[in-house]
Image (cartoon, rainbow, N blue to C red):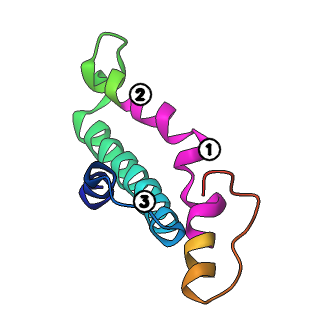
């Protein structure tokens, strides 16, 4: 994620290859974050499910963001990265590339 942000902040021209790799990386970060928050929720126990629990709020927020189509690693991000790496044309369904 830091590499993606540094690239955007640098003001350098971002190539299609950069965009495909960044999309893969950002969606994978979302996947890792969901797993980390799920682990935290599991460790916190049943009391973390209460509405007033800040852990529950964070868990719910992370889950909600991860459901956005842009954060879907499997939908197109991983597929298009693989296509690019193997020299195949990108899947045109991915509107975010």
| Residue at 33% in and 59% down | 12
Q: Nearer the viewer, residue 4 or 67?
A: 4
79 left or right, relative to 41: right
Q: Name the mark on residue 69.
A: 1
Q: Secondary structure at mark 2?
A: helix
Is residue 73 within the magenta segment? yes
User: Gap in Å between the C-alphas at discs 3 and 1?
Assistant: 13 Å
Is residue 88 within the magenta segment? no
* Residues at discs 3 and 1 in contact (Cβ within 8 Å): no
* Quarter of the picture holding the C terminus: bottom right
Q: Position of residue 9 (x, y in %)?
A: 27, 49
User: Gap in Å between the C-alphas at discs 1 and 2?
Assistant: 15 Å
| Residue at 32% in and 27% down | 58
Q: Name the mark on residue 28.
A: 3
Magenta stretch in the rendered image: 59-79
Residue 42 sits above or below residue 85 on the image: above
Q: Position of residue 49 (x, y in %)?
A: 36, 22
Q: Nearer the viewer, residue 78 or 42?
A: 78
Query: Dot 1 surroundings within 10 Å: few (below 14), some, or many (20 or more)?
Result: some
Q: Name the mark on residue 40.
A: none
Residue named by callout 2: 61
In the rendered image, the residue lying farthest to the right is 93
């Amino acid at each position: 994620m830091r590499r993606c942000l540094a690239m955007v902040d640098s003001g350098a021209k971002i190539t299609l290859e950069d965009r495909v790799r960044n999309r893969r990386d950002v969606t994978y970060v979302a996947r890792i974050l969901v797993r980390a928050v799920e682990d935290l929720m599991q460790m916190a126990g049943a009391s973390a499910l209460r509405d007033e629990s800040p852990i529950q709020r964070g868990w719910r927020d992370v889950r909600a963001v991860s459901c956005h189509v842009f954060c879907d690693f499997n939908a197109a991000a991983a597929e298009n990265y693989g296509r690019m790496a193997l020299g195949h044309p990108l899947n045109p369904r991915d509107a975010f590339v």
